[in-house]
Amino acid sequence: MTAKAQKITQRTQSDSFIFCRALRVIFCAFAPGRRFGKNLAMKFLFLLLCPTLLLAQTKPRRVWFDTDIMIGMPSPNPREVDDGVTLIMALRQPDKIELVGVSTVTYVDYGAEVSQKLLGWYNRDASGKPRKAIPLYKGSNTGQDTGVENDATRALADALRKEKMPILALGPVTNVATVVKNHPELASQIEEVIVCAGRTPGFPFRPGLEKVTVGDYNFERDPEAFRVLFDAGIKMVLSGFECSAYTLLGKTDIEFMEKSSFEGDQWVYAQLRSWQGRALKLFGIEGFIPYDVTPLGYLTHPDYFKYYRDIPVKINRKPNDATIGSLPNGQEKPFLEASYEYKDTKWRAIYAYKTLPGFEEIVIESLKGK
């Protein structure tokens, strides 16, 4: 045996000896007739377990990030920016979450391109050094073809075979539902799916000055995908318009980005300002609701929201209440609704219905990198 191997063996034997002696002390402390034994044993166990408990509390949660990101997409009108804001915010919370992978749904080529751009700018530590690369995959381009495999569904399935994790699904849930439909054995590997969708009965989606009503796009794009997830018994968290409406980012909230010398901030600022201008025309206010930050907030800052827990959920068909969009107002469409009044459904969810004061500041500070 080499000197190095002998040294390692001696150290291992020494560590084992110390551990066995520690266990013996604990067992003896519990022996009958020991007046001080129980307290001594409990203190000793606490000292042994304390580092492990602290590590468990501080370890970031590993999350899959599925998005229909469109920020900056060439179009006659500016496109939604909230997925982009949410991705930046997620990257700025490394103590709370770790992105296992990013997948795109709808407009997947552009989504992958802009996601890669944002990852290059913002997946960095406090010193500006790039962190470990996060893999990026293209998913369903239509957001309406549940069951059809793609690069994203294959990668997500592979990741779930290795570990359990939650999925943050910020667009149509087509990619996630495809994995569950084609690989039902992996459903138990999904800890929960957090989505930006759903409503309580009769709640209208009216941003800004409430002049117009918008639809529940993420659900309405692929209702059957939601049905797959609920039927599989997966834990669902609904955090849609009703919860997000309490958060608004106006012009003054993002001025710091205009003053920043960082290329990423300059680009993002231009997209946010364009979207704020669009919001002024559509909704009467020069600001926007970053809808998707509240599903992320459920993972990173859960105490900043109020919830209905274990609430029954149904898909109901009702006249369309949206005043903008391709579907004529009044024509029937599906609604994803949650209510304790529903007695004829087995579907259940956690429903976030209110954002508490302080979360908007967290969003802004995350964009600042603080």
Image: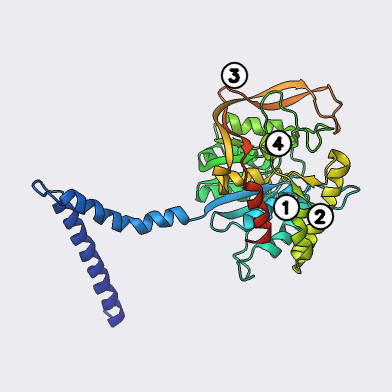
In terms of secondary structure, where does tag 4 sit? helix
Q: Residues within 10 Å of mark 2 (few under 14, many from 20)?
A: many
In terms of secondary structure, where does tag 1 sit? helix
Position of residue 122 in the picture relative to residue 162 (left or right): right
Q: Residues within 10 Å of mark 3 (few under 14, many from 20)?
A: few
Nearest to N terminus: mark 1 or mark 4: 1
User: The N terminus is located in which quarter?
Assistant: bottom left
Nearest to N terminus: mark 4 or mark 3: 4
Please state which of residues 133 and 59 is positioned toward the viewer in this rendering: 59
Nearest to N terminus: mark 2 or mark 4: 4
Q: Residue at x 56, y 27 (%)?
A: 311
Gap in Å between the C-alphas at discs 1 and 3? 36 Å
Rendered image quadrant of residue 323:
top right
Q: Is residue 261 above or below residue 83?
A: below
Q: Amino acid at mark 3?
A: Glu
Q: What colour scheme has been applied to the protein in the rendered image?
A: rainbow
Q: Which residue is mark 2?
A: 271
In terms of secondary structure, where does tag 3 sit? loop
Residue 84 numbered mark, or none: 1
Q: Residue at x 10, y 46 (%)?
A: 32
Q: Amino acid at mark 1?
A: Gly
Please say if the residues under marks 1 and 4 sit with CB atoms less than 8 Å apart: no
Please state which of residues 198 and 269 is positioned toward the viewer in this rendering: 269
In terms of secondary structure, where does tag 2 sit? helix
Nearest to N terminus: mark 2 or mark 3: 2
Nearest to N terminus: mark 1 or mark 2: 1
Q: Amino acid at mark 2?
A: Gln
Q: Which residue is mark 3?
A: 341
